[in-house]
Image (cartoon, rainbow, N blue to C red):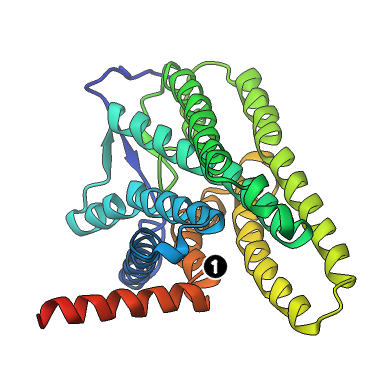
Amino acid sequence: MEQWNSTLGSGFILMGILNDSLSPELICATITALYMLALTSNSLLLLAITMDARLHVPIYLLLGQLSLMDLLFMSVVTPKSFMDFLLSENTISFVGCALQMFLALTLGGAEDLLLAFMAYDRYVAICHPLNYMVLMRPRICWLMVATSWILASLSAIVYTVYTMHYPFCKAREISHLLCEIPPLLKLACADTSIYELTVYVMGVTFLIPPLVAILASYTLILLTMLHMPSNEGRQKALVTCSSHLTVVGMFYGAATFMYVLPCSPLHSPKEDNIISVFYTIVTPALNPLIYSLRNKEVMGALRRIQGRYMLWTHS
């Protein structure tokens, strides 16, 4: 197949979910509404955690990082998709594609690790409450956050550089919402079978250990909850953990489908686009609603911030 010059001046055409849809206007409006919901809810959560001293505790530090990752993840994909639809211009430069891939891999990988650290936080809070402020002191929390970002960034830059070094064929159309490894490799003119196997193995390595850690944490939490004498204590622990498990299920389900089951018969450009919309747009929009904005402490913090703002404006 004829090759095209994959240099800095070349580009790709992103054939996202809007191009293949029977009602692109409706889907575009839905995606825009989800983006605005995510922007508002995650921003409110970050505002509450930053401004209210009562939320300067480990779990809310981790939740704030999750909100930041979700905001950035959505912003890597959604604004460009929206503008491409409005302008009927789906091109993305070679450098832009590489940057989008790097950012998406970094944010997805960081969230993968952060969810495991959040599960550990819940395990310590419920199973070892007396030692919570020792085992989850600020230095350890920031170490968890830094580990998530650094490991994800290092992994992402290796994947991005190696993926983009391939020669690509003249057909520049990427049948996907964003520049990701599996759809991009379909355009490569070289043999990518060994690299695809490497991506699969590394995907399993990056996804499965955190997932095992999460499941182990919640198994121990469940055993502890069964021995709680108070029904109120059991109910509070169950509500807290169920919200976390909902987020975990949405995130890991989509990531597993995309990277751990790349040869599944269910894979097609349309299904892959739907999955991509789910973990880049839907999940970030729902995370703060599931996790925190129904939390009494967060809502109380927002009311206090609103009260202070009202006093300031009338002073």
Instruction: Left or right? Give the position of 290 relative to 210.
Output: left
207 or 245: nearer the viewer: 245
309 or 109: nearer the viewer: 309
Residue 52: horizontal and vertical position, in percent? 37, 65
Binning the other alpha carbons within 10 Å of mark 1 as few (below 14), some (14 to 19) or many (20 upward) gives some
Q: Quadrant of the C terminus?
A: bottom left
Residue type at numbered disc 1: Tyr
Residue 243: horizontal and vertical position, in percent? 63, 69
Q: Residue at x 70, y 48 (%)?
A: 265
292 or 271: nearer the viewer: 292
Instruction: Left or right? Give the position of 78 relative to 114.
Output: left
Asked whether the viewer can see residue 267, the reply is no
Q: Residue at x 32, y 68 (%)?
A: 40
Asked whether the viewer can see residue 41, the reply is yes
Residue 238: horizontal and vertical position, in percent? 73, 73
In the figure, 157 relative to 118: above or below?
above
Residue 44: horizontal and vertical position, in percent? 35, 67
Q: Residue at x 72, y 60 (%)?
A: 129
In the figure, 43 relative to 290: above or below?
above
89 or 287: nearer the viewer: 287
Residue 225's image quarter?
bottom right
The residue singled out by tag 1 in the image is 291
Q: Quadrant of the N terminus?
A: top left
